[in-house]
Image: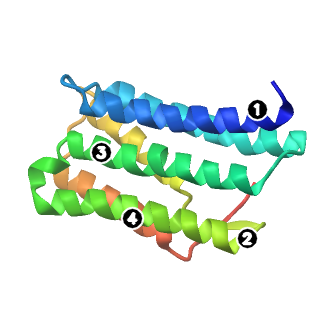
Amino acid sequence: MTKKIIASAITSANLLAGVLALVNILGSSPRYQLSAFMILLAAVLDGLDGRVARRLGIASEFGKELDSLADLVSFGVAPAMLFYGLGLGELGWPGLLGVLLFVLCGALRLARFNVLNIKTYFLGVPITIAGSLAALLALISLSPYVTLHLNMMLAFLLLLSWLMVSKIKIPKF
């Protein structure tokens, strides 16, 4: 395997983890907990691909674009559908609107990130963090010891949506 393929393979694994999260949500017997874990696995892979590319000196525009596409699936669409499956769909149009807004704000966040190319900080909460927080809340909601009202879950999703497109500056480490 050449050096150029390694980072793209990690990014592709991130994308596939997001797709597997969706498959586990949409199957005939949904496995929401496994879906949440697949989103968290995608986050680990997302943290690796850029580091590997920079360390090997193979960072590229192609890799950056592939990463954004993978992130939209793994941290935008998959967490939104997870919340929808966990009950936001029962809220009718407010639940659907929350899911759609989360995906849209995630896409806008990624587009802004790619265009601005700010080196010292993130403008708005990165979609990886928002999607991972959503997956963690989903895991908490699946616990037999915790009961989360659907309106609380919707409010959390709306808050994450706003944070992604906000002007909050978050330092890069």
Depth-wise, is mark 1 or mark 4 nearer the camera?
1
Q: Is residue 74 visible?
A: yes
Camera-side residue: 18 or 47?
18
**Secondary element at tag 4:** helix
N-term-proximal mark, 3 vs 4: 3
What distance separates the C-alpha of mark 1 from that of mark 3?
Answer: 30 Å
What residue is drawn where x is 25% and y is 33%? 26
Q: Is residue 36 visible?
A: no
Q: Which residue is mark 2?
A: 118
**Residue neighbourhood size for the residue with mark 3, other residues' Cα within 10 Å, grouped as few (<14), some (14–19), many (≥20):** many
Q: Which residue is mark 3?
A: 81
Question: Which residue type carries mark 1?
Answer: Ile
Q: Are marks 3 and 2 in contact (CB under 8 Å)?
A: no
Depth-wise, is mark 2 or mark 4 nearer the camera?
4
What residue is drawn where x is 33% and y is 39%? 138
| Residue 146 quadrant | top left
What residue is drawn where x is 38% and y is 43%? 78
**Residue neighbourhood size for the residue with mark 2, other residues' Cα within 10 Å, grouped as few (<14), some (14–19), many (≥20):** few
Give percent across and percent down for residue 160. Answer: 41, 60
Give percent across and percent down for residue 137. Answer: 36, 42
Q: Is residue 108 above or below residue 59?
A: below
Depth-wise, is mark 1 or mark 3 nearer the camera?
1
Q: Which residue is mark 1?
A: 6
Q: Is residue 66 left or right of residue 96?
A: right
**Secondary element at tag 3:** helix
Question: Which residue type carries mark 4?
Answer: Leu
| Residue 119 quadrant | bottom right
Q: Are marks 1 and 4 in contact (CB under 8 Å)?
A: no
Q: Quadrant of the C terminus?
A: bottom right
N-term-proximal mark, 2 vs 4: 4
**Residue neighbourhood size for the residue with mark 4, other residues' Cα within 10 Å, grouped as few (<14), some (14–19), many (≥20):** some
